[in-house]
Image (cartoon, rainbow, N blue to C red):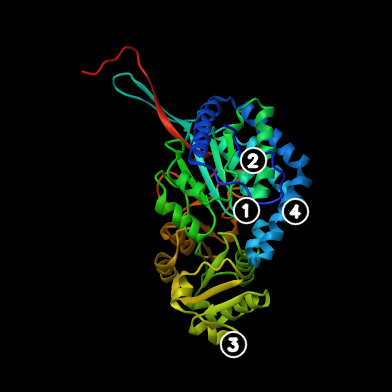
Amino acid sequence: MSHAFRQDSPAVGNDAEALSSDALLALGRAARQAARAVALAPSEVKNRALRAAAAAIRDRCAAILEANQLDVADARARGTAAAFLDRLTLDPARVEAMARGVEEIADLPDPVGRVLARFERPNGLIIERVATPLGVIGVIYESRPNVTADAGALCLKAGNAAILRGGSESLRSSRAIHGALAAGLVAAGLPPAAISLVDTPDRAAVGAMLAGLDGAIDVIVPRGGKSLVARVQSEARVPVFAHLEGIVHVFVHRDADLDMAKKILLNAKMRRTGICGAAETLLVDKACVASHLAPLIQALLDSGCAVHGDAVTQAADARVTPATEEDWRAEYLDAIIAVRVVDGVGAAIEHIARYGSAHTESIVTQDAEAARRFLDEVDSAIVLHNASTQFADGGEFGFGAEIGIATGRMHARGPVGVEQLTSFKYRVYGAGQVRG
């Protein structure tokens, strides 16, 4: 079974035929077989495949952009929102960033085989806990074609096989990028099925992946909108690394430097409004309302951001519209923000605990004790002090890239990079010991 369906088809439409259940199961079996080869591959072989894939991405830049332009044109004709179009669109700089990202993953230390712990028992047994690949990782994603490169490269670096299923809106783009990854695998002598693409817009393929492809898939990672993630979390029969929403907060404490607060807030909200690390709620300390609230609101409004605020915020600027209870739970993914005045760091923590999604939160303050309390007590995957929430990204963490952000409390949390794509086993060394 080929590692991708219709991989030789020209990028002229998202019209791939529906796949039979037998074909999908065969794809899973091929990925499972490839996973063993990749798990045993030396670091230099995996790195050679990644660097060859990066070179192929650059060599095929024109073809990737041509395929992407067709995807974007279709999306625009459907009246797709601007934020979605931004996530979908590639340009030469973004293709180059993809290639660099794959090379950066190649440069990372190999996570497989790391000795995580070593200890000796009184009976002389020596026990090591050693990092191992997870196996076959299914990645289901929407709109962002760069996820094809990021996810495939990260899975390979961590010794896993990947089964990728991009959204129908980006199928041409994903197909073109996947071709470059496959070329890298072949150049290094690795099985092409190590990075497989489910090349069809048929939604039944998602259901088959969530069912595990008859035991072929070990973990599912969804990356996309709330409806996709909710479906995956509801239907998956295998473990899931995911976050449902990114209800991200910036809290401006009474001891915040105003200029710093403005800079951080505007970047957190407006740098890219459609990503999961974009700020959706601004909390302002009651103690600094007189000095900070109006300038912060004006900066947001002047940057083109709509503001929904509580009564105090509305009084600070006539352009603010009233916030409802739904606004505190809103993930806008757009140039809109909810603003609320709270009574100190404790009230900010309580607001985040009630309305947040355990994704990313930031406090802006010069008070070290307030920052320590916020970082200790806010139970989110990522908490920052005096920095933009848009640093919630595996690349910015030095992971090379990320396969997604996980907000659960088991195994992986925060940016899911190569280390989080491993499990472990115990190696036990004896000298003839038997148990009494």
| Mark toward the viewer: 3 or 1 | 1
Q: Earlier in the sequence, mark 1 or mark 2?
A: 2
Residue under numbered circle 2: 6
Q: Secondary structure at mark 2?
A: loop
Gap in angstroms between the C-alphas marked 3 and 2: 56 Å
* Mark 1: few/some/many CA within 10 Å (<14, 14-19, 20+): many
Indicate which disc, 4 or 1, sits on the residue closer to the N terminus. 4
User: In the drawing, what numbered circle is on residue 144?
Assistant: 1
Which callout, 3 or 2, points to the residue nearer the camera?
Answer: 2
- Residue drawn 71% across the image and 60% down it: 73
Q: Write the residue at 57% across / 66% down.
A: 333
* Distance (Cα) linking label 1 and label 2: 20 Å
The type of residue carrying mark 2 is: Arg
Q: Say above or below: 209 vs 228.
A: above
Looking at the image, is mark 4 or mark 3 earlier in the sequence? 4
Q: Position of residue 104 (x, y in %)?
A: 66, 40
Q: Quick one: quadrant of the N terminus?
A: top right
For mark 4, give the secondary structure.
loop
Three-letter amino acid code of the residue under disc 4? Asp
Q: Can you say whether 22 is above or below 333 in the image?
A: above
Which residue corresponds to the image point at 67% horizontal and 49% vertical from the top-left? 172
| Residue 212 sits in quarter | top left
Ranked by sequence position, the earlier of labels 3 and 2 is 2
Task: Report the residue marked by disc 4.
Answer: 91
SS under mark 3? loop
Lower position in the chain sequence, tag 2 or tag 4: 2
